[in-house]
Amino acid sequence: PQAGILLSGLCILIGQSFMSYFAKISGDYSPKWGRKGLIMVSLSSLTIRCFFLAVLLSAQEQVETESQSNMVKALILSTQFLDSVGAGIFGTLHILVTNDISCRTGRFSLMLGVTTGAMCLGATVSGYIGQAIAQDHGYPVAFTSLGVMSLIPFFMYLFCMPETLPD
């Protein structure tokens, strides 16, 4: 029972530590590298994480020894790094892209509020759908489903969103 508490704490520690690092990198380098490529890295890291978790959770069901179980738990914990990449980059660039799009319109706050609300709604619905699928079909199926669903915003951003970095 205490292992769950420790793993939860480590997830938060790893997530927040690396997220700050990637937020700093994206803030420093987005004027040089552009915004779209970095956001694509962010979106793809979350998709990859879902698929890794699906594989690792399936593997965990077939573990036979305590050392194998600990190895799988460590690998599951390491996927938090991918979450940090996604959250750090997206958290920073969301504000920058919103500013780029709303530049000189006087609507930055409105646009930021609407897009933040949409992201929060998406996170809530995603968590609900994931838990509903996990309850009926197991966590590997839930993470695979969420990974497939996360391809929708990835491809929408890839094909429908231009680079917003001002000249």
Image (spheres, rainbow, N blue to C red):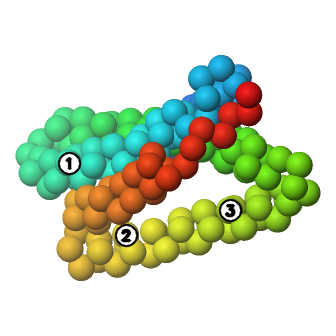
| Residue at x-position 57% and y-position 44% | 162
Name the kind of residue labelled 1 in the image. Answer: Val
- Hey, which quadrant is residue 76 in on the image? top left
The dot on residue 14 is: none
Closer to us: mark 3 or mark 1?
Answer: 3
- The tally of labels here is 3
Q: Nearer the viewer, residue 2 or 133?
A: 133
Label 2 residue SS = helix
Q: CA–CA distance between discs 1 and 2?
A: 16 Å
Quarter of the image that includes the N terminus: bottom left
Residue at image mark 1: 55
At x 72% / y 67%, what residue is drawn?
A: 114
Label 1: which secondary element: helix
Query: Residue at coordinates 19% horizontally, 35% vertically from top-left?
Result: 67
Query: Could you tell me the amino acid type at mark 3?
Result: Thr
* Residue placed under numbered mark 3 in the picture: 115
Percent of width and height locating residue 144: 26, 58
Mark 1 and mark 2 lie on one chain; the one further toward the N terminus is 1
Left or right: 159 as drawn, with respect to 106? left
CA separation, marks 2 and 3?
22 Å
What residue is pinned by disc 2? 130
Residue 78 lies left or right of residue 120; in this view the side is left
Query: Contact (CB < 8 A) between labels 3 and 1?
Result: no
Mark 1, other Cα within 10 Å: few <14 / some 14–19 / many ≥20: some
On the rendered image, what quadrant is the C terminus found in?
Answer: top right
The location of residue 6, given as percent across then percent down, is 47, 46
Q: Does 113 sit above or below residue 30?
A: below
Q: Earlier in the sequence, mark 3 or mark 1?
A: 1
Task: Tell me, yes or no, if residue 73 can be seen here.
Answer: no
Figure check: 82 above or below 110: above
- Give neighbour class at mark 3: few <14, some 14-19, many 20+ (Cα, 10 Å): some
